[in-house]
Amino acid sequence: MLSRNELKLLVVFKIASVRAFDLLIPHLVNTLQRASFNAPW
């Protein structure tokens, strides 16, 4: 069983990773679109 502090850390980590994911996805999409847009074919 996890202690209260460990549980809090887990929740914070989960929120942080979800946040990072939400920020990362549009960035990746933009990069991919730019790459395909600049592609020679």
Image: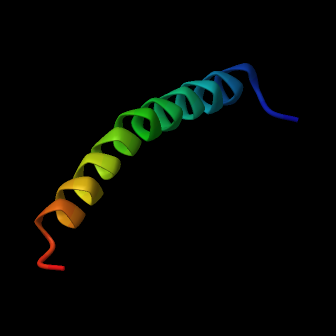
* Residue depicted at x 45% and y 29%: 19
Residue 11 position, x and y percent, is 63, 26
Q: Is residue 11 left or right of residue 41?
A: right
Q: Looking at the image, how many numbered discs can be counted on the residues?
A: 0
Of all residues, the one furthest to the bottom in this rendering is 41
Residue 10 position, x and y percent, is 63, 32
Residue 32 against residue 4 in the figure, above or below: below
Of 20 and 33, the residue lying toward us: 33
The answer to which image quadrant residue 7 occupies is top right
* Residue depicted at x 18% and y 56%: 34
* Residue depicted at x 11% and y 78%: 40
Residue 10 against residue 5 in the figure, above or below: below
Quarter of the image where the N terminus is located? top right
Q: How is the image coloured?
A: rainbow
Of 19 and 33, the residue lying toward us: 33
The answer to which image quadrant residue 21 occupies is top left
Residue 41 position, x and y percent, is 18, 79
* Residue depicted at x 49% and y 38%: 17
Residue 11 against residue 30 in the figure, above or below: above
Residue 37 position, x and y percent, is 17, 60
Of all residues, the one furthest to the right in this rendering is 1
